[in-house]
Amino acid sequence: VKYVQCACMTAAESLTTRLPKAGETIIGHKFFVGFGGKGANQCVQSARLGAKTSLICKVGSDSFGNDYVDNLKKNGISTAFVGQTTDAATGTASIIVNSEGQNVIVIVPGANLLLNFEDLKRASDVICKAKVVVCQLEITPAVSLEALKMARASGVKTLFNPAPALADLDPQFYTYSDIFCCNETEAEILTGIPVGNLEDAEKLVIVTLGAEGCMMISGDEPIPKHVPAGKVRAVDTTGAGDSFVGALAFYLAYYPTLSMEEMIRKSNCVASVSVQALGTQSSYPYRKDLPQDLF
Ligand code: ADP
């Protein structure tokens, strides 16, 4: 069982020729609603590769929340620990995109911030018997950290994606992550983190570099290693990082004997397929559509 701990968001996107000014109403030409949240995206990618996944999260008892649960089920993800609450609305991202691709985004975390220690306790069986636990920062950071600690205490491998980046990230996040995977922007914001205990050979830091693939920094190798991504024609890179993290979690859980470099190379392949189609979850490939040598 692989388990992903997460955030759920309904993303509503409006396409316009230009962004409105304060107080202005403008007419757009397209509107669509999709499913997002980093943890949920990662879980969807893992599930589409064939992983058995469970999501621990909270959504509202509203129509967005109901649709969200349906979407998870459609992707074969266990929703046993997806809570629904009347105390807050499902998390949302309201996005306006102009014809140059620039955007303005308002995120309202809503129910995501109500996921608490009690919820983790109820899910402790799933957390402690998983092969891999994946956490991000779109829920209350202390709750994410607690999930990593619970996993670690049971010898479960932990993959932490410090996104969205926090400048004053608690250094314990580093201590309790076997693999710390961030993108370039996050790495820049986080460089205040003490990474002095890299001598722990199990510890691995991965920085994703978009079209360039990844850099892996391992405790037992003095020189960081570049793992390039294949050359592809990218049409939309939104959510590429989540596709990568979801794929990596899949390989950690199901192909634990592969070298880390090989897992990263394969995860690059999966994520580079996702950038060749539009959207976030809609661009994530299924196992059947990928080259079979990835499995
Ligand atoms: P984020 O979405 O978090 O900013 P990145 O942009 O670093 O993450 O992308 C994550 C991964 O997606 C990369 O490590 C790579 O595997 C793949 N990827 C992203 N952009 C491209 C691209 N233009 N061509 C090929 N692969 C890409």
Image: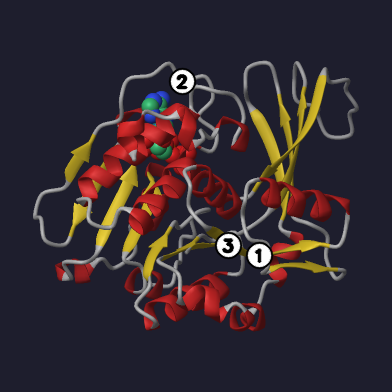
Q: On the rendered image, what quadrant is the C terminus found in? A: top left
* The one of 4 and 38 positioned closer to us in this rendering: 4
Describe the element under mark 3 as helix, strand or loop.
strand
**Mark 3 = which residue?**
54
Q: Position of residue 265 (x, y in %)?
A: 27, 38
Question: Is the residue marked 2 within 8 Å of ligand 1, measured from its CB?
Answer: yes
Q: Earlier in the sequence, mark 2 or mark 1?
A: 1
Describe the element under mark 2 as helix, strand or loop.
loop
Residue 201 falls in which quadrant of the image? bottom left
The residue drawn where x is 37% and y is 53% is 181
Q: Is residue 215 left or right of residue 236?
A: left
Marks 2 and 3 close (CB-CB < 8 Å): no
**Mark 1 = which residue?**
57
Q: Of circles 3 and 1, which is in front?
A: 3
**Mark 2 = which residue?**
234
Amino acid of disc 2: Ala
Question: Is the residue marked 3 within 8 Å of ligand 1, measured from its CB?
Answer: no
Q: Give the crowd class for mark 1: few <14, some 14-19, many >=20 residues within 10 Å.
A: many
